[in-house]
Image (cartoon, rainbow, N blue to C red):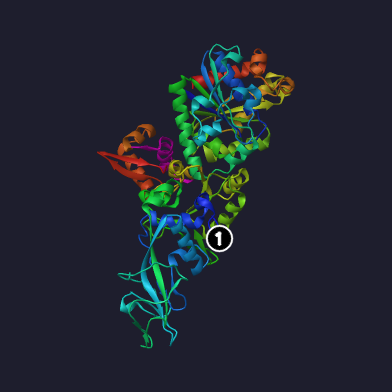
Amino acid sequence: MIRAEGTPIRGMEGLFRDRRVQLFLGKFLSGELNRLTPIFDPQLGYRYPEVEAFVDGPDAAEAFLLDLERRGLLVREPCGLLVCCPRCGSCNIEGAPPDQKGSPRGDHRVNPVSGAEGEKARGDELASTEGGWLCRDCGSPIGDGEGRFRRVFCFQFSEEGIGRIADRLVVAPVREFLGKRGYRTVSPGSLVGESEVLHSFDIVAYSDDPGEGALAIDFVVSDGPAGEEKVIAMFAKVFDTDPLRSVLIAFPGLTENARRLSEQYRIAVVESGDVGSIFKKLMKIIPPPEEAMMETLDVMTLLSLPDHLRRTATVVSGLGRGTAEEISDRTSRARAVESGYLNQLVRMGYLKKEKRGREVLFSVSS
Amino acid sequence: MAKMISIHSSRGGTGKSLVSSNMAVIYASMGRTVALLDFDFRAPSLQTIFRARDRVKGWVNDYLEGRARLRDVMVDLTDRFRVEGRLLAGFANPEMEAMREIARKDRRWQMRALRRVMAMKQELEEGFGVDVIVIDTSPGVQYSSVNAVVAADVSVIISTMDILDIEGVQRMVRELYVPFERRTIILVNKAMPHEFASDEGKEALLARAKGMFTQPLIAIIPCYCDLLTASRVSPFFLDRPDHPFSRALGEVAKRLEAL
């Protein structure tokens, strides 16, 4: 996984290598987030919790957003005014609905202020505002020049800006791929380990069945091949959480040592220099959810089956898929008998059954 | 229809690679189009015997991985040997990293590998016009070997008369070959030469061997010291076609083809 760092992003190239950028813009591009709106915070005034998930705290979150705005990737618009009472010291965001104010740790969305003037970032306090305010806590009037006023901002992504770099953003297309494959994704997502420690992955993908395991996916984007420390970091989480499958997507790739280590740790690796070519590789690694949960019909598993099923399963395993008639031709048993055995293997989770036109096909997972 | 023959054993050192390489050359000498495949990914040796590294564009490992096409893997060795037919060979990658890579493959990969072995058989027959496929496997119950055994039309298990080999073969037959209903033949190799000194000795040896194995016995070949001293970097049959070992293998090849 790309480490979350509180440092500013260096250069445009640095954008793509920054985990925070990949994850955050991935939320916009995947449609999970259309508009980033701050919430009220009794201590800080306001904050952006969606961003705090992958930077170091509220200040870093705002700095991060402003950095992206400066680079033309986000568009900022005022959507509220933080007003602090000079008498009781409490702060509230004006422009928010009346029932969404000031409760401790409240998750209150701020409504845009219509006709707001001027656009200043956090830290740029306004000297005065048009008209006055009544403190919502002590009821005192707050006149011009008396209180502290601060504009708060909402952010949207800039289609033009994102369009310029879309081919270098990996999280959204991978989430889209997983969505088409039948998975529900959370990014960044968390899994609780055996140790009861919560581990964060860049993407966690779930199938519809809550009983099934999750896929854990991390990204590493670097100038050259990434070293084994990335694999080791992921393994520590995988070892504890034991996901159904763990995948490390590396741009442009891993060093030889890192690759060997990932094989040893059974972390599937997708290495690619461009986003477009990763999906073919992902197709091999990440089967549709129903296939991911199918039992593997390797030769050792075949050996463990009862004799009557082994013959059937061995034939399907060799063919990949076939109808009951095709299987019975090869097993030299009656089609009806073979059909019974095939359905038994389906119930045991070894085969998948699907209808194609008038044919019923039995297949092993890909 | 191409016949796929896997050459297997329970332990190492029984002569699998010697038998499989020479069997392939024998079939090619008989005018057949032959594909010899090295499935001993843990200790590849056919590439050493045939000295063909300069011609290899892809390894069998790469084919199973889906990284190479069969036409890039199969090396045509016909021009190197005086054979009437055609001799093709697919080699296992002898690099240590390649051995490690394949040893770490999971069950799902092995399941796909079985399908690729099946597909390989079909492609060799239809695309290359192959009559006989000979597979040299790893000893024991390795995934690659069992995949080859399951895909093969007939399996030859090579055993010596050493009790360790014999019991290993008995177990393998009972727990692997019988469950998969494979046609299985036993070839005893490296039998003690003194037991061939008299007809009585041969009879006794045959009776003993038949009593040891439940599967049909195709031949008992004595241990030849000159085989040990012969060059291992070319197929023995080509250098010594009239040697008793070559003649015995020739007979085995004919019997297997007739099955």
| Quadrant of residue A41 within the rendered picture | bottom left
Query: Which residue is denoted by mark 1 in the rendering?
Result: A5
Q: Residue at x 61, y 14 (%)?
A: B81
* Residue A309 in magenta stretch: yes
Instruction: Give A122 or B107, whichever is nearer the viewer.
Output: A122
Name the residue type under label 1. Answer: Glu
- Give the x, y percent position of residue B254: 54, 17
Q: Residue at x 49, y 64 (%)?
A: A63
Q: Residue at x 45, y 49 (%)?
A: A170
Secondary structure state at the residue bearing disc 1: loop
Instruction: Give A280 or A307, whichever is nearer the viewer.
Output: A280
* Residue B248 in magenta stretch: no
Which stretch appears magenta?
A: A303-322
Query: Can residue B42 be spotted in the picture?
Result: yes
Instruction: Give B114 or A224, whichever is nearer the viewer.
Output: A224
- Give the x, y percent position of residue B240: 67, 14
Whether residue B98 sits left or right of residue B178 in the image: it is right
- Give the x, y percent position of residue A142: 38, 84
